[in-house]
Amino acid sequence: MRRSELFIKTRKQAPADEESRNAQLLIRAGYIHKEMAGVYSYLPLGKIVIDKISQIVREEMNRIGGNEVLMSTLQNKELWEASGRWDDKVVDNWFKSKLANGADVGIGLTHEEPLVNALKAFVSSYKDLPIYPYQIQTKFRNELRAKSGLLRGREFLMKDLYSFSRSSAEHDKFYDETAPKAYMEVYGRLGLGDITYRTFASGGYFSKYSMEFQTLSDVGEDTIYLDRKKNLAVNKEVYTDEVLADLGLSKNELEEVKAVEVGNIFPLGSKYSDILDLYFTDKKGQRQSIIMGSYGIGISRLMGLLAEHFADDKGLVWPSAVAPYDVYLCRLGDEADVKKAADDTYKQLESDGISVLYDDRGDRPGEQFADADLLGLPWRAVVSSNSLKAGGAELKKRGSEEVKIVPTKSIKETLGKPT
Amino acid sequence: MRRSELFIKTRKQAPADEESRNAQLLIRAGYIHKEMAGVYSYLPLGKIVIDKISQIVREEMNRIGGNEVLMSTLQNKELWEASGRWDDKVVDNWFKSKLANGADVGIGLTHEEPLVNALKAFVSSYKDLPIYPYQIQTKFRNELRAKSGLLRGREFLMKDLYSFSRSSAEHDKFYDETAPKAYMEVYGRLGLGDITYRTFASGGYFSKYSMEFQTLSDVGEDTIYLDRKKNLAVNKEVYTDEVLADLGLSKNELEEVKAVEVGNIFPLGSKYSDILDLYFTDKKGQRQSIIMGSYGIGISRLMGLLAEHFADDKGLVWPSAVAPYDVYLCRLGDEADVKKAADDTYKQLESDGISVLYDDRGDRPGEQFADADLLGLPWRAVVSSNSLKAGGAELKKRGSEEVKIVPTKSIKETLGKPT
């Protein structure tokens, strides 16, 4: 993509009302726009990043048998009254509105109730289970404070999967093994694998614990106690002697660290399925309860965390799996041979399947380099009369200071090399 | 995909409260679930269809220079007060809610105001224009009545593109030529090209006319007067002698027909850009107004129209461009050779890049055939001991009665043939 065909403009200063580093960087680099506290729009570069994160999550959910759906945002009050979750005293972060006829309507903050209700037409026999519907959908939660950029939104993109199992054993296998493995695959592909830990947290109404996935970060809202050897952590909210004993963890081995919750999974028992009358008939013809679990990953939160974690004082440093383009190609100079060489390089890389953001402005090398750094694409390639004299393009990996001249035809191989 | 791995279940009867044929069919076939009037969730098959329609629209918008963004649903009241569109007396189909601090917030029904506001950080010079941001995003409109299934939703998926031009000439070229051509490409790819017409409609505040794209359909809410020779129509709302004279149309050549509006484009002049203070500096250093246009396509409405239009008394008949799978593969019988042949056919087609929904239930041929018809995939393939004796699989195109035996290795070529 030629930069002139995309609306991109960088800023030296972050907006005064934006306190969080992730949103400051993403706004300065033109990835997002702040609509209000906790509400952001995704501009062209940001849309590509959020789509890439979504696609990684989608692939891992499909791999474990997930069926993608898209539930409505507008919520039928009756279903939530049935489960007792309509009342603002029970759930205190609803957005609500009214239909033109005066009836109350909710703005979706999670989807257990409507999904269970929809499945009544699809699940009746043991042959219909287990199933794992999921969606990547915009959620709305009326947070009183939202000062953490994409890390805590009033409007945010989330993957929510729900498991429907025929027995506790079937549930446990998915909950304890299949889903956590898929979650760690996601974090691994995003470059967060070695700083993300399974963490025991409070279990709510349905079980002793829920399981969180916590990524170490100084800006995390959570405090966890981490046993690096056992690769496990405990959230401060359940950090008691009793819990440690229960989990076989020892205080001496635990390290107190700040972390961002990048995923959580909850056992739900049969609360929602029972209340909303979703049962199955087993092989013997007996009616049985359906065991549920819910499995969330905050997609926009992950984008915020990646922006916060993979950054330096010059700007963003995207992992290549989610970078909006592979290469930031600078053309320095308007001479005919420089133009031709830069245009040719652009076309050749694109036809090689390498995505390029081509800064075709020609002038102001300082601005081009600063933008390349701020935007944080994995590679910068520079074509100038100097680079051509030296034998090709100047290639530099974002985050490294090493610059080397590479014949333009060999850029592809250089990019392919592990670094 | 094996049918047993996807939650699919068909129904003989449509739900009693669903009046529209498109939603009746889509619900019976398990593509969508009705949450309330005008609000539907997309189940696995429906999600694939809506994604395929979205992708066709996306490709055509990218081809004409569109930049994809994703604006927020939650709307800042102040921007809409500035344009005069916050008041329910002016815009009567808002959903509104409140932030936890008591401030009003809107639920997005269109995005001129927030997009113009966001662009203030990106547009200042003539070099920054023209630009064509667009999104494929869920819109909310508080319709009093919503009885047409996906054809008129309270919550619906829409593509909205906005053009920002430096002059009327630049605007006109995009509005009159580029965008309509891209729109007709979309309808052509969806199989609606020869029944969709550019239609003059009322222009609102900014111009004499707007342009609608109307697809002929008995269930259409619109009445248009169509000149088939000139390939043009006039919406009843502007069907006057004066307008006909203005457009060079003659009453004698016009046919009154029902139609569904599948797209509309509006010239917006500089109303929103001026009010929200978005200007550009021209080559001479003079401040100039920016000319805008808006260009909508109802993605979920198109899905409803396709379901309504491409259907017969047995069910849906999807155009292949949007069908969730290419082939419905039935296995009839549990004999080892039948199982092996059907499994092999499934694997072979999938590895050939043909997507297959594999009904691996084995029994009840009548049910399998009825489901194949109702789901409306372009082809049905049947593997049974009879078909194997006859030399392969029975292949039948949806909508045709012709059944022929094709060696399973030749299915791919048969599907590839124009029919």
Image (cartoon, coloured by chain):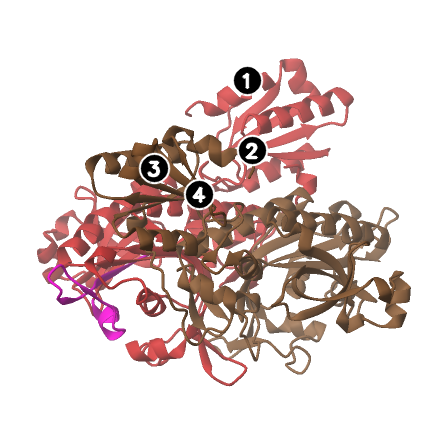
Chain colours: A red, B brown
Q: Residue at x 91, y 65 (%)?
A: B245
Q: In the picture, which quadrant includes the C terminus of chain B? A: top right
Q: Are marks 4 and 1 on the same chain?
A: no
What segment carries the magenta color? A270-296
**Front tag of 4 and 1:** 4
**Amino acid type for the residue under numbered disc 3:** Tyr
Asked if one can make out residue A235 in the rendered structure from this viewpoint, the answer is no
- Chain containing mark 2: A
- Chain containing mark 3: B
**Front tag of 3 and 2:** 3
Judging depth in this view, the residue of B212 and A208 nearest the camera is B212
Q: How far is mark 3 from mark 2, CA to CA?
A: 35 Å
Judging depth in this view, the residue of B326 and A225 nearest the camera is B326
| Residue indicated by mark 3 | B346
Q: How far is mark 4 from mark 2, CA to CA?
A: 42 Å
Counting other residues with Cα less than 10 Å from the Cα at mark 1, is it few (<14), some (14-19), or many (20 or more)? few
The quarter of the picture where residue A409 lies is top right
Residue B288 drawn above or below residue A308:
below
Q: Is the C-beta separation of discs 3 and 2 under 8 Å?
A: no
| Residue indicated by mark 2 | A355
Counting other residues with Cα less than 10 Å from the Cα at mark 2, is it few (<14), some (14-19), or many (20 or more)? some
Across and down, in percent, residue B39 comes to 48, 70
Residue A410, disc: 1
Residue A339 drawn above or below residue A30:
above
**Front tag of 4 and 3:** 4
